[in-house]
Image (spheres, rainbow, N blue to C red):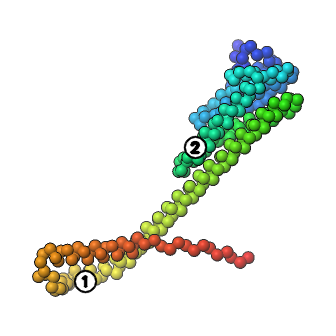
């Protein structure tokens, strides 16, 4: 049973083209036979795509172009490149708006397949340029494909650097917070060790000093006690939560 070709049935292409295509487009590549050039390309991939959507652009021996879904003429290849440019521009806007590590990771996850596809697209057009050196339009399209690959690569690098910086900053903040908590716990232990013997002895021997406040009007003694307690608590809170000094930068060692 003859399998159905991915190429349009009306295309009068060499038989070898149809024989070399399976049930899917496969990798991006060029086919050249009897002065016919076939570009097997991929539409811009989406982050959740598991299969690449094939796109076929055929150059006839007379120099005319046609495609399976982008119309005819060299403009079909130009539209294909324009779709990649639009997708890369969308990720560029997302990268500019990203603020958290999750935002940057989303950009990288979506941009990675686009970058790979753009790189393979450039390689495919470079090979097509080698096979058909007399076609000046292929030079222009190849250069545009290189610009797309370069732009996507720079954008990916910028997003990855921003993600690394966000992760490093988060780790530094967590380290500083852990250090502050450990220092606060240490200070609390010091205060407990200092006052615990005094409080224990006072409880054992029932220390109850006469200070004269017993005969004061009821609200006055209570307010004095509350005020003194709040003042002492504020002093202790300031002492416990005080930030430690930053570590001095390491001095370079003499070689």
| 147 versus 15 height, above or below | below
Q: Is residue 30 left or right of residue 160?
A: right
Q: Quadrant of residue 255?
A: bottom right
Q: Which of 109 and 152 is in front in this view?
A: 152
| 196 versus 119 height, above or below | below
| 2 vs 1, front mark | 2
| Residue shown at 38% from the left, 78% from the top | 190
Q: Quadrant of residue 135?
A: top right
Query: Which residue carries the number 1 mark?
Result: 201
Where the N terminus falls, by quadrant?
Answer: top right
Expressed as whole percent of the image width and height from the top left, the position of residue 113 reads 65, 38
Q: In this view, which residue lies farthest toward the right?
A: 134
| 76 versus 189 height, above or below | above
Expressed as whole percent of the image width and height from the top left, the position of residue 150 reads 72, 44
Expressed as whole percent of the image width and height from the top left, the position of residue 6 reads 70, 20
Q: Nearer the viewer, residue 42 or 91?
A: 91
């Amino acid at each position: 049973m003859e399998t159905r070709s991915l190429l349009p049935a009306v295309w009068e292409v060499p038989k070898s083209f149809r024989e070399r295509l399976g049930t899917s487009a496969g990798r991006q590549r060029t086919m050249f036979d009897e002065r016919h050039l076939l570009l097997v390309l991929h539409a811009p991939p989406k982050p959740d795509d598991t299969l690449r959507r094939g796109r076929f652009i055929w150059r006839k021996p007379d120099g005319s172009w046609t495609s399976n879904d982008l119309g005819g003429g060299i403009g079909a290849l130009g539209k294909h490149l324009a779709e990649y440019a639009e997708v890369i521009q969308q990720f560029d806007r997302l990268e500019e708006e990203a603020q958290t590590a999750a935002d940057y990771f989303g950009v990288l996850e979506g941009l990675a397949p686009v970058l790979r596809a753009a790189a393979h697209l450039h390689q495919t057009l470079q090979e097509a340029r080698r096979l058909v050196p007399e076609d000046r339009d292929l030079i222009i399209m190849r250069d545009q494909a290189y610009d797309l690959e370069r732009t996507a690569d720079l954008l990916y690098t910028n997003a990855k650097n921003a993600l690394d910086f966000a992760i490093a900053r988060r780790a530094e903040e967590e380290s500083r917070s852990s250090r502050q908590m450990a220092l606060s716990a240490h200070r609390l232990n010091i205060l407990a060790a200092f006052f615990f013997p005094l409080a224990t002895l006072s409880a054992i021997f029932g220390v109850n000093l006469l200070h004269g406040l017993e005969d004061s009007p009821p609200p006055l003694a209570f307010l004095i006690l509350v005020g003194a307690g709040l003042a002492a608590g504020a002093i202790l809170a300031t002492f416990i939560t005080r930030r430690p000094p930053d570590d001095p930068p390491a001095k370079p060692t003499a070689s």
